[in-house]
Amino acid sequence: MRTTVQIVVIFFVLLTFGFAKYRYEDKLSRDMVSLKLIQPPLREGTSLQLGQTGAAVALGGLRSLVAAIWNFRAFLHFEKLDWIKVEETYEIITTLQPQTTYYWDTGAWQLHTNASSYYKEKEDLSPLRRRSMQKRYLEKGSSFLELGLIENPDNWKLHRELSRVWSEFHKLPDIERAMKHFDGALNCESLPEFKRPHIQRSKYYAMTRLKSLQKDAYSYGYSLFKESPDNHLPKLCCTLFALQNSLNIAQNERIPDSELFPSSQKQLEWLKNYIIHEKQGYPMDGVRLKIQQLETSELFKF
Amino acid sequence: MRRNAFFSPARILIIASHTFTHLVRMKVFYFLGVFAVLMLAASFFEMPWSRTTEDSAEQELIVLKSTAMGAMAMFSILFAIAATALLIPKDLEDRTLYTILSKPVPRLDYLLGKLAGVLILVGVSLLLMNGLLSIILHFRTEELLLVEMAKAEAHGWPPEHLELRLAEVSQQGVTWALQAGVAAIFFKAMVMASMALLISTFSSSTLFTIVIAVVIYFMGHFTEDARNYWLHSHSGGVSKELKILTQSIALIFPDFQLYNIIDSTIEGKKVTEGIFSRLAILTLFYSGIYSVLAWFTFRKKEF
Amino acid sequence: MEDIPAVQINHLVKEFPSPFRKTRIRAVDDVSLTIMPGEVYGLIGPNGSGKSTTMKALLGLLRPTAGSCYVFGKNSLKTDSRQEIGFLPENPYFYKHLTGEETLRFYAKLCGMRGKALNNHVDKMLELVSLQDARKRRVGGYSKGMLQRIGLAQALIHEPRLIILDEPTAGVDPVGSREIRDLIVQLKDKGVTVFLCSHLLEQVQEVCDHVGIIFNGKIVKAGPLEDLIAIEDQTEILIKDAGPRTLARIKAVIADSENAKFVSMGKPRTTLERLFLDEAKKSKSTATTAAQKGDDHA
């Protein structure tokens, strides 16, 4: 009887204390979530996949440890080429640590590069099947990165990765899609200034490969060229050269060759290196001709 | 002391240091040896280099930290529960309780002394483990910083880039933020120890106390979900029983998810003073309530 | 000061809930007793008669169901009352991981002692119970007799005015038992009140001056020892070196008297205990002499 009374009193005290503390806890919890100090509650279904021990530890507040271990396991699945398991594992990892860019990045890479090229080259599949699997995993990788962006909206690294995925020549490029992410990266507040030019240039190069964007590409490239001598890189100059030809820019509006290229020798060298990239879709108008001209004049120099 | 105040910090300290010695002489510190070996093993761990991204250095440090802090957290919680659960039943069984309570020792002092003894032990262990972690982490961070600088030389990075990389890597090293994480581990242990104390005043079985404490520990990780469901869910078709259940859970159990700032500090995030002090205050309140309730039960206990 | 009894128990009742039946067990049923300062009080009774329960109530380890207990005027339920009490439980255990010295220091500190006074007391107590040699040894390795002795030491460490001993000589060998009894007499000479309970009746008879007999939770007889055990109508005379003629004359005197009747005459017997102790003393002195001879030869 005595014990029962005691238990009732204790229960009552705990409830009263509970009423006093729950608002405090709620506020503290929401403040912590907004400061990204604690993760929002785990998505449903994940606990089932984690296995008993993993869940126990994860719930014990050691998600980073479980994520690190699962990352290791993902690597083992990768070695066995078990793509389904790889995907599953990375889903779990990113649920545990949604703010760690590394995991989104690596998980997506496994899908859009490793898995995708695996299927591309799998000889015992029909060409049609190969292509569809390649595309499927490319899409999976891309969606994965996009999911990462939902969790981390201002993440320029993820945008950059997405732009690479969709502009990569060896994959199945979709330049317009890549554009979205180039702009996304450039608009991120977290983007360090010294990274900006590199991304701008990458955006420009991608634009040059799409005929419909070549006009905009030219104005963009023009402004980049004028903006800073750091941008006077071989590829940029060569593409400008070719674009000026393909768009029939008026002579007085063009950047003259003497300004574009440091010397005619350099021009020859750069253009010869540039033409190798023809298959990748870069504009090549007038490049061959110019190379012939320069080579001839070189000959006559001696 | 002659006046036998109701509550005497001096006497609590005597019992606390006695409890501390008791636990130490139980060879508890051998665990630290295991921890040290684990730490050293983890420090030699290298990320499987399937992919070298810019972030890899940070990831390595994070893995090191999460292994160490994981071990520290596990040890602290388990020890806090087990040691506290053990103390009073042991005193009762060995009848050493009689000799203490027949002295002018208020029961509150006895309880607080036992609790303090356990917490001092947990605290000292954490300090030692933290010290070891800091040393190993420091050396590993320095190594990685050198690697970054070599990369900068090799690839000709602009100085801002190098600075950024060095800052990013250093943020994963030994920082004050990480210490906040260690403190959060201690807070969690403090709440669990006081809870175990409360349960042990009811039950004279160590095993029972441990089991109940562990169950409450797990329930405490769902408190946040229960509370969110109760306060912030807007779905209409919620049964009354479920609402009451989630309400009760949210009220009675501590919200252990709040201590998950440990994870964030492992990732190098900073904990503001405001958040930290609020968490500390909450911890003190929990410990206080559980201790008072423990005293409430214990003072009427008959031997 | 003298008027306040050392122990005052008023109509103490203690009931325990019975685990199987609805009825409650009365371990102590309306017990009242008073012990004045300086007395040695023995509470005797069979196992389960309520002796330990009464002691525990006095120590505040139990709450009375009815009635009250006072120690030097302070209610036993108050922590203060225990400042004046030293308690030696039956089969005492101490923290095995502490040495004898550390044990005493711990308990002394709990009672509020500090610094030099503390150190002096610890030394004194260790000497009193003859445990100086074992002071650095862990209590976990002590024999039963040593445990009893350290128990006494911790009971006395804070110089209490009342000592409560629960079966102090149970399971202790005759030599140790004799030492404890001598100690009790010493304490009495110093004016310390002693409250002990035992079922070793001869020993109680030897040291106590007041006695209470408890059966089934009730005090059935209590009072000064001498009064209780005196056989009113008989007298005992002990004579040394009396020859047969003297004895015959004494017998004649008795025969002559009106009421007096001769009951018995014979050689008084020593007790087995006294025999044992004499042998122990003898063997100890032989050992010491042999050791000294050995030293002389070396």
Image (cartoon, coloured by chain):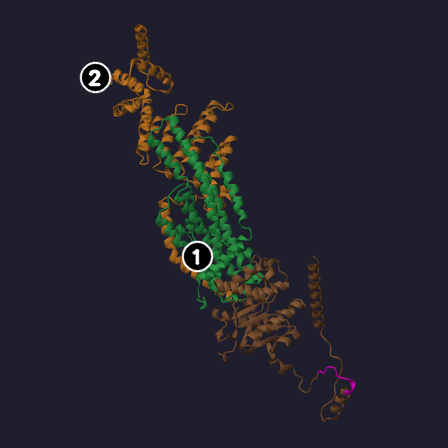
Chain letter, brown: C
Judging from the image, mark 1 belongs to the subunit labelled B
Residue A139 pos. (x, y %) = 41, 31
Q: Quadrant of residue A9?
A: bottom left
Residue B263 pos. (x, y %) = 43, 44
Give yes or no for residue C239 being in the magenta stretch: yes
Q: Quadrant of residue A109?
A: top left
Q: Is residue A155 above or below residue B244?
A: above
Chain letter, green: B
Q: Quadrant of residue C144?
A: bottom right
Q: Which residue is mark 1?
A: B287
Mark 1, secondary structure of its residue: helix
Look at the image and tell me whether residue B222 can be seen.
Answer: no
The amino acid on which the numbered mark 1 sits, given as a three-letter code, is: Ser
Q: Which residue is mark 2?
A: A252
Crowding near the residue tagged with mark 2, few <14, some 14–19, many ≥20 C-alpha atoms within 10 Å: few
Query: Marks 2 and 1, how far apart in space?
Result: 81 Å
The magenta-colored residue range is C238-245
The residue depicted at 49 percent of the width and 46 percent of the height is A56
Q: Is residue B61 above or below residue C64?
A: above
Q: Main secondary structure of the magenta part?
A: loop
